[in-house]
Image (cartoon, rainbow, N blue to C red):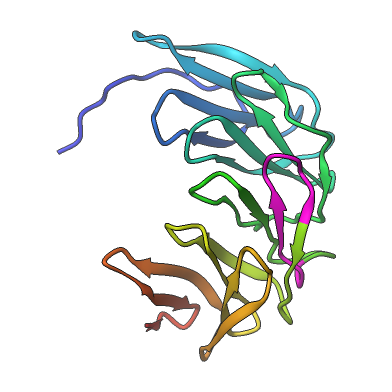
């Protein structure tokens, strides 16, 4: 059974909402005004920590870093932004990336990297690994069609991407080189890792098949 711990109301037209892994922060954004708000738990309730009006287009994805110190956003203004939660501001200038509606992103568990991708759009065939500390582009990867899902391995040494080109690919995060390509019969719409065996990769395809 589930128990309600806290409840409250979000503003009308809230487009995306995300909660940090430690549950101390909630981030959400307005679909039309692009107003981005971060709430912080004070021991009794969530109160506004900071907000930003920096986005110039609809925000379609929000991701917290594993240590809950940074927030990554994807916007239709063609920029990815990393916010410093403690500093309550942008960590560095936005980085250019052509997001469209379905745009998977992720921080690596060790906090060194973040990765951007999109299922449709000008950058759909080139997921990118970035330096999370500086925002510098580290590695431009390659698919023949848009990326539908991505995830880092627990040790942050590999990035797995699943694409509409009917492949999942495993990448070395330190070099950007491809390690393995897994072919499936339809779009690779989801990827996963066996928590008991990091060498076993799962691909979930649009035809409802699971490949291991």
Residue 56 in picture, x, y percent from top left = 84, 34
Q: Nearer the viewer, residue 93 or 26?
A: 93
Q: Nearer the viewer, residue 182 or 39?
A: 182
Q: Is residue 142 left or right of residue 160?
A: right
Q: Nearer the viewer, residue 162 or 107?
A: 107
The total number of labels drawn is 0
Q: Is residue 91 left or right of residue 42?
A: right
Residue at horizontal 20 percent and vertical 29 percent from the top: 3
Question: Which image quarter holds the C terminus?
Answer: bottom left
Residue at horizontal 54 percent and vertical 35 percent from the top: 17
Residue at horizontal 68 percent and vertical 69 percent from the top: 176
- Residue 84, above or below 138: above
Q: Which residues are magenta?
A: 124-137
- Residue 33, above or below 164: above
Residue 14 in picture, x, y percent from top left = 60, 31
Quarter location, residue 210: bottom left
Residue located farthest toward the left when viewing the structure as drawn = 1
- Residue 65, above or below 166: above
Quarter location, residue 123: bottom right
Q: Is residue 5 left or right of residue 31?
A: left
Question: Which image quarter holds the N terminus?
Answer: top left
Quarter location, residue 164: bottom right
């Amino acid at each position: 059974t589930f128990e309600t711990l806290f409840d409250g109301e979000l503003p009308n037209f809230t487009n995306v909402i995300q909660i940090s892994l430690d549950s101390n922060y909630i981030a959400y954004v307005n679909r039309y005004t692009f107003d981005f708000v971060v709430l912080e738990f004070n021991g009794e309730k969530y109160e506004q920590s900071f907000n930003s009006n920096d986005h110039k287009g609809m925000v379609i994805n929000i991701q917290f870093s594993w240590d809950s110190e940074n927030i990554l956003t994807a916007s239709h203004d063609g920029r990815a932004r990393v916010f410093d939660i403690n500093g309550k501001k942008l960590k560095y200038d936005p980085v250019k990336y052509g997001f469209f509606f379905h745009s998977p992103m992720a921080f690596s568990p060790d906090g060194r990297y973040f990765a951007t991708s999109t299922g449709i759009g000008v950058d759909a065939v080139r997921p990118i690994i970035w330096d999370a500390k500086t925002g510098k582009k580290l590695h431009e990867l390659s698919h023949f069609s848009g990326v539908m899902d991505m995830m880092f391995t627990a040790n942050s040494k590999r990035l797995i991407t699943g694409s509409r080109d009917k492949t999942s690919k495993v990448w070395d995060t330190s070099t950007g080189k491809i390690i393995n390509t897994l072919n499936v019969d339809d779009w690779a719409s989801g990827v996963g890792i066996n928590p008991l065996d990091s060498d076993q990769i799962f691909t979930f395809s649009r035809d409802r098949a699971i490949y291991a």
